[in-house]
């Protein structure tokens, strides 16, 4: 790898989106409806540079695939070390960069068509593109950063940008509340992440990736003492806390479904390329720490599997398309976390990569439907749109097939790998993964059939029209990715992606993997049998959805009437929001009221008492003011006379 | 050329007259004229000392004072007109809003 080229590309990746954001914000009032070019050029330049980096990394061999590039001394605090602004480029980084900037570029292009009303730019058009570009910048800092401090900076910047974008329609109370919720829930996770970083610094005396991971591998602290297993586990669990916040895992998942209050392209960006992938990326990056603690890995796998199943059950009954997609994202992120937890981080990243394509595709497709339906996204209010929106229909089905894990589509390969590894490590969690796969196929196609199949139903006063080329072009590109991305990782193509990522995980997840029954996972029947089985599950799920929602529609209402309790529990998302409200929000609000009372009576009373003293004195003195000009003149003359007398007397 | 006592006495008389006028009269224009009178008392002092010391500083100073007095007169008369428009009287006692 050529360090100078990498350095230049890294700088371009960081500065181009930032410049795009600043220019879009500063010149927005001049450029108006052309502001999107700033974001497109900025993100496009970053994408081009990412391709160059990918080619460089792909062409390298052996030890050469990892490059640490210091740009400048960032915080020179003297002892014990200097925090440098440095970039780390390795296969994991290059793949993440490609995903982030590539998907983001498509989302930005799509937004040009989406953020318009009757062909005119929507209110806040320039603000939107400035935020989008800033979001990409933040994510690139997170991915490119070569130490935990930069990771944390990108991490927080991503949180800020998500807040700004979710609350983009800040005039709507629901959007403002969703933005606040996302920010606050993320803060809980970030607090754990911050503690983890402090603990890493205290234990190892540095925050740079390579030295920290090397020390973890050797099992010694920065001072050369042996590091206890408990410390490693604590660090890993605190890092997991951060990942739970960003990647919307139980119990911090509550912000993600609400995040769809933002414009649809934002949902696509958050759910596919940026933000939620940060947690999974961080766990893969910190593989040395996670894989050193069996306890932490078990917790990770457990949380992942639980989240996958939990979110999938909720998605079964929702009627808001974007909400279904949001829960499917949580569920798929659960798979990725499960993948990390069963020492298959490369499969998790593979799933992250394929998921980015089909989830961006689905969200942008849902946005296209919403655009055509005049802002309505509730499946009860429209249906049978396959003739009205032919392009959206076809691309949406492609995305759904990939999400459902239909054989030979991208989601099939990556999800199957994770389940495969999970079955070897924790058979129970693997079984949960299989069950979730069935549910996923069912709820995905429930949504597809309700929206596109059956007779045409369109809300009153809406004149649907297929979206323009700005929106359809990204959909088509993403469809190709949703079909093809899976072939990068499978056996038949020489396991390209896994070989590519191998140098990153070879010394972490691979070496630290406990000795499971190796024979259980290999051999023709174990691998291809599982493939056939999970593919079969996907087909069963799709067929079940077809029977229930197209052929025998009377069946659909049956669960609601037969098992009302289950139905309403799922409809109300297991009452998690209500539980948080009762346990946290309400007591805190009461505490706030007590504080207001103290402020109003105790502190204000004290202040009133203190200010009463000068007020009383002033009341006495102000009687001397006559308000007459000549009175003041007389006192001046008198004063002058006194001074003269004093001067001549002495 | 001996003493300048006479000049100083003349200046002092002008200043004292002005001061008394300033303090005792109610009419805003007369009050303003009294300040001008005090000014002239000071100017005479400046000129007298210039004569005593044989240089022109005091005289130049006197010219500046006159110029400033003229400007100030313009401003002050303008203000008096404004005040008169507000209340329809020139009585200084009409303006005592600052009374505590």
Image (cartoon, rainbow, N blue to C red):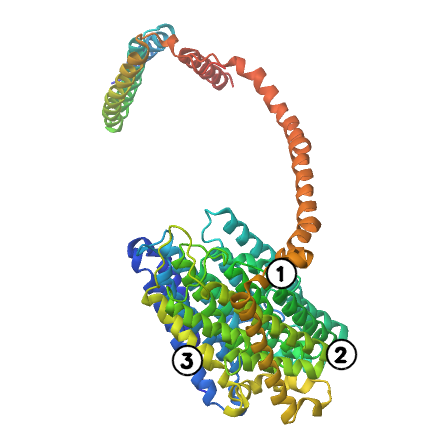
Q: Nearer the viewer, residue A520 or A451?
A: A451
User: The residue marked by circle 2 belongs to what chain?
Assistant: A
Q: Nearer the viewer, residue B60 or B88?
A: B88
* Rendered image quadrant of residue A440: bottom right
Residue at 58 percent of width and 58 percent of height: A255
The residue singled out by tag 2 in the image is: A226
Q: Nearer the viewer, residue A340 or A506?
A: A340
Measured in 3D between alpha carbons, the distance from the residue under mark 2 to the one under mark 1, in whole angstroms, is: 61 Å
Res. A51 mark: 3
Res. A558 mark: 1
User: The residue marked by circle 3 belongs to what chain?
Assistant: A
Q: Position of residue A572 (x, y in %)?
A: 63, 55
Q: Position of residue A583 (x, y in %)?
A: 71, 50
Residue at 50 percent of width and 80 percent of height: A409
Q: Residues within 10 Å of mark 1 (few under 14, many from 20)?
A: few
User: The residue marked by circle 1 belongs to what chain?
Assistant: A
Measured in 3D between alpha carbons, the distance from the residue under mark 3 to the one under mark 2, in whole angstroms, is: 42 Å
Q: Residues within 10 Å of mark 2 (few under 14, many from 20)?
A: few
């Amino acid at each position: 790898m050529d360090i100078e080229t990498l350095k230049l590309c890294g700088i371009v990746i960081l500065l181009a989106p930032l410049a795009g954001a600043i220019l879009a914000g500063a010149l927005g009032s001049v450029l108006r409806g052309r502001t999107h070019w700033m974001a497109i050029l900025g993100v496009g330049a970053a994408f081009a540079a990412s391709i160059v980096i990918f080619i460089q990394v792909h062409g390298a061999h052996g030890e050469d695939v990892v490059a640490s590039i210091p740009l400048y001394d960032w915080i020179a605090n003297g002892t014990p070390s200097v925090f440098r602004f440095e970039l780390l480029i390795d296969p994991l980084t290059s793949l993440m960069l490609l995903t982030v900037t590539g998907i983001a570029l498509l989302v930005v292009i799509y937004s040009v068509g989406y953020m318009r009303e009757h062909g005119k730019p929507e209110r806040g058009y320039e603000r939107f593109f400035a935020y989008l570009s800033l979001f990409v910048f933040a994510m690139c800092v997170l991915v490119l950063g070569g130490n935990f401090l930069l990771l944390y900076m990108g991490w927080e910047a991503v949180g800020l940008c998500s807040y700004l974008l979710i609350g983009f329609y800040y005039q709507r109370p629901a959007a403002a509340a969703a933005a606040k919720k996302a920010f606050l829930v993320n803060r809980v996770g970030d607090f754990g992440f911050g503690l983890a970083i402090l603990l890493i610094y205290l234990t190892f005396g540095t925050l740079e990736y390579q030295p920290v991971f090397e020390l973890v591998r050797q099992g010694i602290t920065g001072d050369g003492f042996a590091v206890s297993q408990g410390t490693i586990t604590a660090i890993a669990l605190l890092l997991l806390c951060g990942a739970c916040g960003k990647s919307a895992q139980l119990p911090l998942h509550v912000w993600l479904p609400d995040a769809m209050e933002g414009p649809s392209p934002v949902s696509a960006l958050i759910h596919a390329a940026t933000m939620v992938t940060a947690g999974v990326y961080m766990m893969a990056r910190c593989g040395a720490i996670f894989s050193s603690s069996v306890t932490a890995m078990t917790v990770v796998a457990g949380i992942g599997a639980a989240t996958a199943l939990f979110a999938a059950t909720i998605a079964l009954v929702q009627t808001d398309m974007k909400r279904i997609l949001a829960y499917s994202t949580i569920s798929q992120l659960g798979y990725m976390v499960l993948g990390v937890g069963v020492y298959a981080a490369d499969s998790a990243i593979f799933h992250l990569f394929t998921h980015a394509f089909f989830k961006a595709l689905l969200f942008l497709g849902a946005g296209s439907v919403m655009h055509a339906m005049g802002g309505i996204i509730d499946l009860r209010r429209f249906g049978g749109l396959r003739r009205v929106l032919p392009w959206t229909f076809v691309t949406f089905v492609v995305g759904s097939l990939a999400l459902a894990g239909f054989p030979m589509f991208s989601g099939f390969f990556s999800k199957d790998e994770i389940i495969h590894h999970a079955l070897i490590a924790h058979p129970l969690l693997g079984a949960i993964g299989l069950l979730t796969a069935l549910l996923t196929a069912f709820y995905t196609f429930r949504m597809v059939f309700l929206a596109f199949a059956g007779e045409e139903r369109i809300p009153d006063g809406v004149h649907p029209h297929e979206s323009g080329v700005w929106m359809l072009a990204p959909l088509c590109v993403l469809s190709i990715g949703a079909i093809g991305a899976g072939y990068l990782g499978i056996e038949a193509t020489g396991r390209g992606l896994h070989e590519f990522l191998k140098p990153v995980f070879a010394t972490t997840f691979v070496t630290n993997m406990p000795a499971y029954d190796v024979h259980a996972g290999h051999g023709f029947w174990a691998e291809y049998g599982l493939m056939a089985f999970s593919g079969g599950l996907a087909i069963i799920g799709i067929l079940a959805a077809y029977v229930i929602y197209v052929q025998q529609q009377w069946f659909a209402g049956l669960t609601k009437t037969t098992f009302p309790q289950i139905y309403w529990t799922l409809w109300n998302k297991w009452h998690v929001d209500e539980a948080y409200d009762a346990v946290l929000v309400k007591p805190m609000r009461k505490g706030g009221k007590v504080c207001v009372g103290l402020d109003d009576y105790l502190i204000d009373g004290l202040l009133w008492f203190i200010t009463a003293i000068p007020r009383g004195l002033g009341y006495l003195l102000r009687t001397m003011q006559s308000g007459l000009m000549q009175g003041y003149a007389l006192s001046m003359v008198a004063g002058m006379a006194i001074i003269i007398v004093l001067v001549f007397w002495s | 050329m001996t003493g300048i006592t006479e000049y100083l006495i003349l200046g002092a008389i002008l200043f004292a007259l002005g001061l008394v006028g300033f303090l005792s009269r109610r009419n805003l224009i007369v009050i303003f004229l009294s300040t001008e009178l005090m000014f002239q008392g000071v100017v005479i002092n400046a000129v007298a000392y210039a004569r005593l010391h044989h240089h022109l500083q005091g005289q130049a100073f006197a010219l500046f004072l006159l110029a400033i007095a003229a400007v100030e007169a313009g401003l002050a008369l303008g203000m008096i007109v404004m005040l008169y428009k507000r209340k329809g009287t020139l009585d200084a006692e009409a303006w005592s809003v600052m009374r505590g």
